[in-house]
């Protein structure tokens, strides 16, 4: 996996964690699975409701953007908090949401370019 891809994944996970900390989520599980040509990030947040994560879900559900993929990803961590989530969404192929009895599970899919 190219070094640049590793840096993108580090920024993506950092943005997710920063969002959660800013919203006072202090307990969650984040699992990153790297494959040859894709990555999945599984985020499980106990005692959360979809309604409380709506802002994050809406912003990261944006369409992947090739220009952000090439140049804009470096802005993650440098821009305003809300803009960071939108940039994150432009690096993710899709997000799946699962509401369990005691938690919310968000699975982020990213195909390596």
Image (cartoon, rainbow, N blue to C red):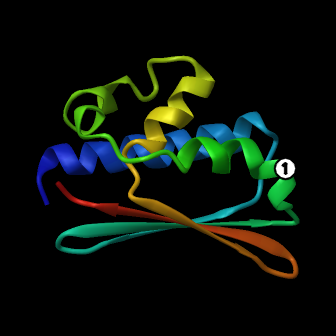
* Crowd rating for badge 1 (residues with CA inside 10 Å; few <14, some 14–19, many 20+): few
User: Residue farthest to the front?
Assistant: 63
User: Residue farthest to the bottom?
Assistant: 101
Indicate the quadrant containing the C terminus: top left, top right, bottom left or bottom right.
bottom left
Q: Nearer the viewer, residue 101 or 93?
A: 93
Residue drawn at point x = 36 percent, y = 47 percent: 64
Residue 46: where, in percent of width, then height? 81, 68
Residue 78: where, in percent of width, then height? 44, 18
Residue drawn at point x = 43 percent, y = 45 percent: 12
| 43 relative to 76, above or below | below
Residue placed under numbered mark 1 in the picture: 52
Indicate the quadrant containing the N terminus: top left, top right, bottom left or bottom right.
bottom left
Image-based side of 72 in relation to 92, left or right: left
Quarter of the image where one finds residue 56? top right
Image-based side of 73 in relation to 66, left or right: right
Count of residue discs = 1
Q: Nearer the viewer, residue 54 or 39?
A: 54
Q: Secondary structure at mark 1?
A: helix
Residue 29: where, in percent of width, then height? 64, 66
Residue drawn at point x = 11 percent, y = 53 percent: 2
| 21 relative to 104, above or below | above
Residue drawn at point x = 25 percent, y = 74 percent: 35
């Amino acid at each position: 996996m190219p070094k640049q891809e590793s840096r993108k994944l580090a920024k993506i996970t950092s943005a997710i964690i920063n969002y959660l900390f800013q919203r006072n989520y202090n307990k969650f599980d984040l699992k990153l699975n790297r494959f040859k040509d894709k990555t999945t990030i599984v985020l499980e947040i106990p005692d959360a409701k979809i309604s409380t994560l709506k802002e994050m879900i809406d912003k990261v559900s944006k369409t992947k953007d090739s220009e952000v993929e090439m140049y804009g990803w470096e802005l993650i961590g440098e821009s305003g908090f809300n803009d960071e989530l939108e940039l994150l969404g432009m690096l993710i192929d899709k997000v799946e949401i699962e509401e369990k009895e005691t938690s919310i599970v968000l699975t982020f899919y990213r195909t390596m370019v």
